[in-house]
Image (cartoon, rainbow, N blue to C red):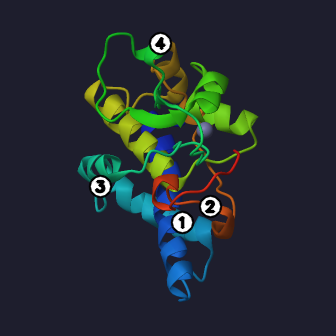
Amino acid sequence: MHTVEDYIFWSYSVLTVTRVMMECEKAGRNHPYSGGRTKASNIVMSKYQNKIFNISNLDRDDALAQMAAPICAHCGDTASAYQLDHLIPRSKIKNDYIGLNQVISCSRCNASRGNKDLMEWYRQNMSFPSLGVLRRYLKLCYFYAKQRGYLNLPVEEALLSGIPFDPRKFPEKFPPVKVLIWDYAYLGAQSRGP
Ligand SMILES: [Zn+2]
């Protein structure tokens, strides 16, 4: 039986490890995880569980969002008119306000997603979010669940209680580092499909 927190911590741990691997690759250094990404993620996860690591607040994401270029956060498209897409669907949170829940989106991604669960939509598109978007989404889900007492519930119970995202859809495995994007908004102008 897994709790909401288990799902968030696992995905966030793989993200943490993947981010380090990405940085090392960019700098032309070997990454420190000779035992592989899964093993390293297990070690990192136990640190989140034991509160040696903590999921950081959204201040940094806020600062990055302020500086972001007007590029679709989902596909990197620069050509279309921009809309705002809610990472946790607005229809599921009703009148709850969640700061930083909106990302810039092209009209095509926004229309295609509708009010689908973020990760379900990516999966349907056989695509994977940029790590910047995934990090922000996991943090939003974590703090939302924490504030409302969902974190330690078994996931099925949380879903029955109306949690507005599906923790079972958080990515458990990530694609190889070389095909991942950190954040479309910092790549400069370019256009690429999902
Ligand atoms: Zn798009």
The amino acid sitting under disc 2 is Leu
The quadrant in which residue 179 appears is bottom right
Task: Calculate the distance from the C-alpha at mark 1 to the C-alpha at mark 3.
Answer: 17 Å
Q: Residues within 10 Å of mark 2 (few under 14, many from 20)?
A: some
Task: Calculate the distance from the C-alpha at mark 1 to the C-alpha at mark 4.
Answer: 32 Å
Task: Calculate the distance from the C-alpha at mark 2 to the C-alpha at mark 1.
Answer: 9 Å
Left or right? Give the position of 145 relative to 163: left
Which residue bears the numbered disc 3?
A: 54
Q: Of discs 1 and 3, which sits in the foreground? A: 1
Which residue bears the numbered disc 4?
A: 91
Q: Which mark is residue 180?
A: 2
- Tag 3–tag 4 contact (CB < 8 Å): no
Which residue bears the numbered disc 1?
A: 18
At 32% from the left and 57% from the top, the residue drawn is 50
> Disc 1 or 4, which lies upstream in sequence?
1
Decide if ligand 1 comes within 8 Å of the CB at mark 2: no
